[in-house]
Amino acid sequence: MPPRLNRVKEKLSSGQTAMIVGGTDDADHIDQLCQIGFDGIWLEGEHGPVDFKDIGNLTRACDLWGATSIVRVNQNEQGLIYRTLDRGAQGIVVPHVNTKEEAENVVAGGKFPPAGLRGMFTSRQGFGVEDYFVTANDQTLLVILIEDIIAVQNLDAILTVDNIDVFFVAPADLAASMGYIGELQHPEVIETIDGSLKKIIEYGRTAGTLVNNSNVEKFASAGVRMLYTVQWPWIEAGAKEFRSQVEKGERNRK
């Protein structure tokens, strides 16, 4: 059988925009999110509970909808990267990649030879795929986080590394590394984020960032093509609106 296609990678490779949503660690919830039309599900293994024992079922739920499963790991370690892929993830997000050498380490862990050094073990994604070791590299999404000011300073060198699919500018940690904890709207933070994304795009590479309903149009218009959001703000906004309507109805009844 042919390999399962990586929807996010396919869309990015063809110049389209990919929409990613996070905030779940439940397979049933993934079913609900995928029916809305997201291209990928971000599974949180750095700051959240997703672990190796969970990845099989969570990624299987994504597979049922043809959505890309993207797991953020907590360290830039080759063994951690390829074990996560072995468990069934179609994509990897690696935090705090600050140098060219650290970006090259991501590739080494995420790609089979000759592109990398990934251990020769069949992933769950390889079951039934006769030429898996030949085709796997084409279906594996590698995302690195530019989330420290030192990474911004080294960005020209980092952008020369091949086989990185997305250079993702992460605003919160970047702001903190600049001395502006929680100040995402500080002019210097905005300038650094926008400048980094612009440089990535000018290099001909794919840029990604965290977005919300208030800024997604700005970033999409600028050419950022991996757009990641979390679901909680929608739940919160919907709950507030629901409560407001209830209170309005109660006032009308009096």
Image: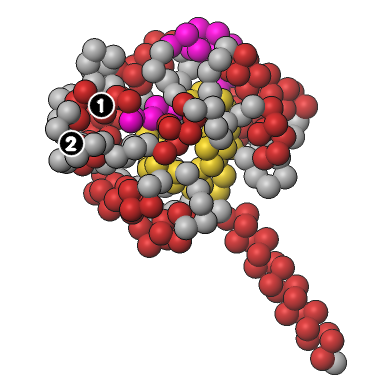
Tag on residue 129? 2
Tag on residue 135? 1
Specify whether residue 83 is in view.
Answer: yes
Residue type pointed to by label 1: Thr
**Residue 131: where, in percent of width, then height?**
17, 28
Q: Which residues are magenta?
A: 139-161
Tag on residue 123? none
Callout 2: SS: loop
On whether residue 167 falls in the magenta region, the answer is no
Residue beneath the point at 70% across and 31% down: 221
Residue beneath the point at 43% across and 32% down: 10
**Residue 207: where, in percent of width, then height?**
56, 25
**Residue 183: where, in percent of width, then height?**
70, 35
Q: Quadrant of residue 164?
A: top left
Task: Give neighbour class at mark 2: few <14, some 14-19, many 20+ (Cα, 10 Å).
Answer: some
**Which quadrant of the rendered structure holds the N terminus?**
top left
Residue beneath the point at 38% across and 47% down: 66
**Residue 3: where, in percent of width, then height?**
26, 36
